Amino acid sequence: MTRQILIIVLASFVLAQIATFATSIYLHRALAHRSLSLRPVAALLFRVALWLFTGQSQQQWVAVHRKHHTFADRDGDPHSPQLLGFWKVQLWNVYYYIREARKRHTVETFAPDLAPDRLERYVFAWGWTGLGLGTALVMLALGWWQGALAMLGHGTLYMFVLAPLINGLGHWWGGQNFQNTAYNSRVLAWLTGGESLHNNHHAFPRSPKFSVRRSELDPSWIAIRLLAAVRLVAIVGAPLRARSARQAADGA
């Protein structure tokens, strides 16, 4: 039983990390900010992973995120802890995301470039189908109850812990390299694919690399470099270095 519990916990963590990396690399850096260009096969793999383990719509996610940048911590921000309070965002982040994602005006205004293609309309738009298939595959690999618990653990960790901390803590408390309303958490960045280097990201949204100091780790950037080495990803935005980032900020 102890071994089975360990497998469930490990599987939950791995699945949450797959979803986190796919969100950070594909939805966030490639689609929302266009700092990466993915080969069709790489884009398809990321879309499949997100469909199986999150059920999210890429157009809706990008629209909500772009709106967040447009109105960061001001009226119009879909999930600002400065406006709503930290615990509301931490505990109800999924609700605020869904509420905003369902607004047709938000999607049409902030993500018109991601109008659904055939794959989106006939496959990936069916989010619950993707989650059901993903759960079935995990159950097939681990056993029915072990797989069900692993998916439950993954969903809890991804949707109710990591993602809310990026939005909540990332606009509430932490370190700052630059003057904006976001904050860095170097420790949390290890678990969120670098997303918790939020202050850096808000200072330079088009940078595909979120870390600017040697003491900061952006795990997604390591994955991006590996993908670029095998020509599955092309880096479009200029990765910022600590000195160039500081000079740019001082000159802004």
Image (tube, rainbow, N blue to C red):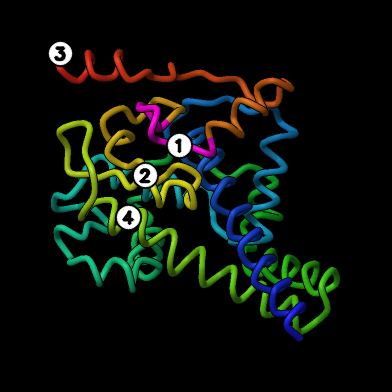
Element at label 1 = loop
Point out the tag, 2 or 3, that comes first from the N-terminus: 2
Label 4, residues with CA under 10 Å away: few <14, some 14-19, many ≥20? many
Residue 88: image x %, image y %? 25, 71
* Mark 3, secondary structure of its residue: helix
Q: Amino acid at mark 3?
A: Gly
- Residue occupying the point 70% across, 35% down: 42
Of the residues shown, which amino acid type is indicated by label 2?
Arg
Q: Residue at x 64, y 71 (%)?
A: 9
Mark 4 to mark 3 CA distance (whole Å): 28 Å
162 vs 35: above or below: below
Q: Are marks 1 and 2 in contact (CB under 8 Å)?
A: yes
Residue on which disc 2 sits: 186
Quarter where residue 154 is shown: bottom right
Q: CA distance from mark 4 to mark 2?
A: 15 Å
Residue, disc 3 = 251
- SS label for mark 2: helix
What separation in Å lies between label 1 and label 4 (alpha carbons)?
18 Å
Residue 167 numbered tag: 4
Residue located beneath label 1 in the image: 217
Precedes in sequence: disc 1 or disc 2 = 2
Task: Determine the CA span between mark 1 and mark 2.
Answer: 7 Å
Residue 134 screen position, x and y as percent: 73, 65
Q: Which residues are magenta?
A: 210-220
Between circles 4 and 2, the one closer to the viewer is 2
21 up-or-down from 99: above or below: above
